[in-house]
């Protein structure tokens, strides 16, 4: 998040439903605290926890580079994945 004079990281807890939709529970800037809260909520609900806080958003150039590497090793891609990549680029 960024404002006029400062920026900070914002972390979220979302409930991910069976249809893939999400319900936001809370968001704030304290990574360790939100992880603790997420673990407690997952335990309370008896559901698995997916921690995506380490994921990075790839820009198009980086994604194309990764696809090029995959082209060099086509045995690693199934037909559907290959088709989706070709449609995207």
Image: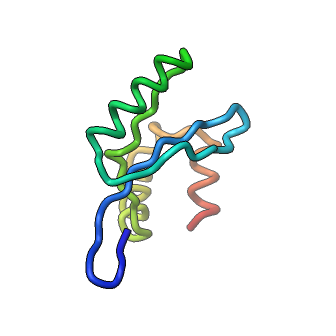
Looking at this view, is 74 or 34 the one in front?
A: 34
Task: Name the residue located 40 percent from the left edge and 36 percent from the top edge.
Answer: 51
Question: Would residue 4 appear left or right of 81 to someone viewing this image?
Answer: left
Query: Percent x, y for residue 3?
Result: 36, 78
Residue 27 higher or lower than 63, as above or below: above
Looking at this view, is 71 or 2 the one in front?
A: 2
Rendered image quadrant of residue 22: top right
Query: Percent x, y for residue 77?
Result: 51, 41
Give the mark count: 0
Residue 65 higher or lower than 21, as above or below: below
Query: Percent x, y for residue 28?
Result: 38, 52
The colour scheme applied to this rendered structure is: rainbow
Residue 67 higher or lower than 23, as above or below: below
Looking at this view, is 57 or 40 the one in front?
A: 40
Residue 85 higher or lower than 46, as above or below: below
Task: Name the residue located 31 percent from the left edge and 59 percent from the top edge.
Answer: 9
Query: Percent x, y for residue 35?
Result: 34, 35
Rendered image quadrant of residue 47: top right
The N terminus lies in which quarter of the figure? Answer: bottom left
Task: Name the residue located 68 percent from the left edge and 44 percent from the top edge.
Answer: 21
Question: Would residue 54 appear left or right of 68 to someone viewing this image?
Answer: left
Outermost residue, right side = 19
Task: Name the residue located 40 percent from the left edge and 68 percent from the top edge.
Answer: 59
Outermost residue, bottom side = 4
Rendered image quadrant of residue 7: bottom left
The C terminus lies in which quarter of the figure? Answer: bottom right
């Amino acid at each position: 998040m960024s404002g006029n004079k400062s920026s900070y990281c914002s972390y979220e807890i979302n409930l991910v439903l069976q249809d893939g939709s999400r319900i936001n529970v809370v968001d704030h800037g304290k990574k360790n605290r939100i992880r603790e809260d997420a673990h407690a909520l997952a335990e309370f609900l008896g559901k698995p926890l997916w921690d995506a806080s380490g994921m990075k958003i790839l820009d198009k150039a980086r994604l194309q580079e990764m696809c090029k590497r995959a082209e060099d090793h086509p045995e690693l891609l199934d037909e559907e994945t290959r088709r989706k990549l070709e449609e995207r680029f």
